[in-house]
Amino acid sequence: MFAREDDVLEAAERWRCEGRGVALATVVETWGSAPRPVGSHLAIDEAGHFLGSVSGGCVEGAVVAEAAEVIASGAPRLMEFGVADETAWQVGLSCGGRIAVYIEKVA
């Protein structure tokens, strides 16, 4: 779901203040034709609710699943998706570019 970046960050803060476990995924690097620019965010709560976008919908499912592990463990993760990456094809990133997404728990 697309939303203004301010809305995504405000939602992450609000969810955290409500006592939910929350992770924030951020596009930290792009190469070639990328669906979303560096700095794009996706906020995810422990129940799997999310707001924002890091890929225009093509890799959000994988990022949401990984975010659940980040929330549980507290350890951040860096995920990379690209046209040559078999995982990227499985999740649908066929735009010809690559993206790196950093996922961290919101404290």
Image: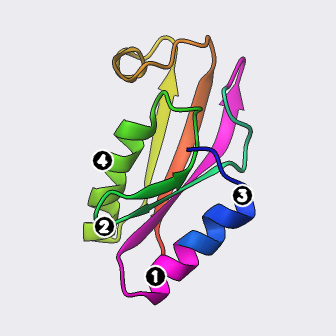
Name the one closer to the observer, 60 or 97.
60
With respect to residue 20, does 59 lie above or below? above
First-in-chain label (3 vs 4) = 3
* Residue at 30% from the left image edge and 67% from the top image edge: 46
Could you give the CA–CA distance between mark 1 and mark 4, rounded to whole angstroms?
18 Å
Disc with the residue nearer the chain's start (4 vs 2): 2
User: 10 Å neighbourhood of mark 3: few (<14), some, or many (≥20)?
Assistant: some
Residue 35 magenta: no
- Element type at mark 3: helix
For numbered disc 1, what is the local secondary structure?
helix
Q: For this view, does 99 lie left or right of residue 34? A: left
Of the image marks 3 and 1, the number of the one nearer the N terminus? 3
> Which residue bears the numbered disc 1?
16
User: Taking 90 as reference, is 101 left or right?
Assistant: right
Residue type pointed to by label 2: Glu
Amino acid type, label 3? Glu
Q: Compare residues 98 and 62 and report the one nearer the observer.
A: 62
- Any magenta on residue 32? yes
Q: CA distance from mark 3 to mark 4?
A: 21 Å
Q: Amino acid at mark 1?
A: Arg
Residue at image mark 2: 46
Calculate the distance from the C-alpha at mark 3 to the C-alpha at mark 1.
17 Å
